[in-house]
Image: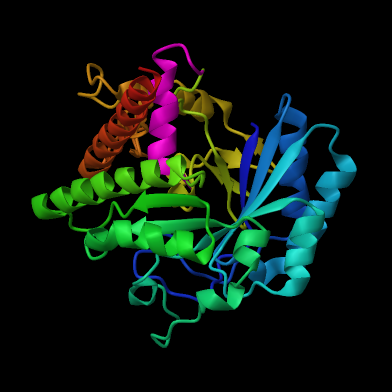
């Protein structure tokens, strides 16, 4: 265990339309949080990572601060810290604390049509992204955006918008629960083709923008030529619910059939080993990009402990790989032309 997600609370001040988390009243106690960190520090090898998650983790900012200080006091190994927040509760005090303790900040923000989905119980948008201002650049915020059938057509415009706001690290996630149709997949491909052109344009002008779907694929692409050791692996990101129960990923929280144990009472090593050693999703064994595709090893796990992949995930990774392939060949061709 070297990668832990702490769900500090089930509570949230937003009700995003596509959120997969159940909202409730459970809040993580300090006892459970400390037990989770102790378990992590006992089992990790050379490096560990802790991500504060929710609900909205900044509703439990005091617990976050206590856990952060505990990690600094107890750990004799490097521990990376991060938070995924909807951004509505970020203030100067937290930013100072995050900078002092090197906590990376990911803000859930979908871009130009963010207010279509990220609303509170009254149907009102709470995030004014411009309020964050220079903090986006100063603290090197990462954007965490959800791609839906409704916004896939403006995906490239959103990437440009995020860059103009100051984001240089962008994470995009497909909303698997939506009703994706063939025309949406075509729009996704067209969007990635436009993004690939922007990616090269920015790179050649000296502006480095990290886009997870593309950069991850480029890294895996390079590994096939011995240029890196990157491979997609089923390294579990252990999600600890507010009650201390442990799950293999965030959207599994609450599914007792996928519960890996509890930070206080201990792990169920049999189910952990079973999940860790699952093979490819049926049908993915011969796919040429399965080494680079997280869908090939299962975006989800069934109650019977079998890996499954959502069809849109399969399309998404193939589209991202094609974009990465185009970028690599474009840069190589231009490099060769310049040397002639």
Q: In this rendering, is residue 152 above or below 281?
A: below
Q: Find residue 265 and report its horizontal and vertical position in percent.
A: 69, 41
Is residue 31 found inside the magenta-colored segment of the image? no
Queried whether the magenta region covers residue 220, the answer comes back as: yes
Which residues, given as a range, are shown in magenta?
210-228
Rendered view: 185 above or below 232 = below
Residue located 74% across and 59% down the image: 98
Image position of 51 with respect to 116: above or below: above
To which quarter of the image does residue 100 belong? Answer: bottom right
Percent position (x, y) of residue 34? 78, 49
Which quarter of the rendering shows the C terminus?
Answer: top left
Q: Nearer the viewer, residue 100 or 174?
A: 100
- Residue 306 in percent (x, y) is at 33, 30
* Quadrant hosting residue 284: top left
**Which quadrant holds residue 324?**
top left
Q: Is residue 197 left or right of residue 81?
A: left
């Amino acid at each position: 265990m070297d990668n832990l997600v702490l769900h500090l609370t089930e509570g949230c001040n937003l009700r995003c339309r596509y959120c997969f988390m159940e909202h409730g009243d459970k809040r993580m106690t300090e006892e459970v949080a400390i037990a989770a960190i102790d378990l992590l520090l006992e089992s990790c090898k050379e490096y560990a990572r802790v991500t504060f998650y929710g609900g909205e983790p900044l509703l439990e900012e005091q617990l976050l601060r206590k856990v952060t200080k505990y990690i600094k006091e107890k750990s004799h190994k490097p521990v990376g810290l991060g938070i995924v927040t909807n951004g509505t509760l970020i203030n100067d005090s937290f930013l100072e604390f995050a900078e002092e303790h090197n906590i990376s900040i990911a803000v859930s923000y979908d871009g130009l049509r963010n207010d279509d989905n990220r609303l509170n119980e009254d149907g009102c948008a709470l995030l004014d992204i411009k309020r964050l201002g220079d903090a986006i650049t100063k603290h090197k915020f990462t954007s965490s955006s959800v791609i839906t059938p409704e916004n896939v057509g403006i995906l490239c415009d959103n990437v440009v918008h995020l860059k103009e706001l100051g984001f240089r690290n962008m994470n995009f996630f497909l909303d698997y629960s939506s009703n994706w149709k063939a025309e949406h997949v075509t729009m996704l491909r067209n969007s990635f083709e436009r993004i690939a052109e922007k990616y090269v344009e920015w790179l050649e002008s000296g502006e480095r923008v990290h886009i997870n779907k593309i950069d991850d694929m480029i890294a895996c692409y390079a590994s096939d030529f011995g240029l890196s050791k990157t491979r997609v692996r089923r390294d579990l990101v252990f999600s600890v619910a507010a009650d201390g129960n442990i799950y293999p990923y965030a959207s599994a929280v609450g599914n007792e059939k996928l519960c890996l144990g509890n930070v206080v009472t201990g792990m169920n090593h049999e189910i952990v080993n079973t999940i860790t050693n699952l093979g490819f999703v049926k049908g993915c064994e011969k796919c040429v990009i399965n080494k680079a595709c997280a869908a090939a090893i299962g975006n989800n796990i069934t109650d019977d402990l079998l890996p499954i992949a959502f069809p849109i995930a399969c399309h998404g990774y193939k589209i991202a790989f094609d974009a990465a392939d185009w970028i690599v060949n474009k840069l190589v061709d231009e490099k060769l032309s310049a040397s002639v």
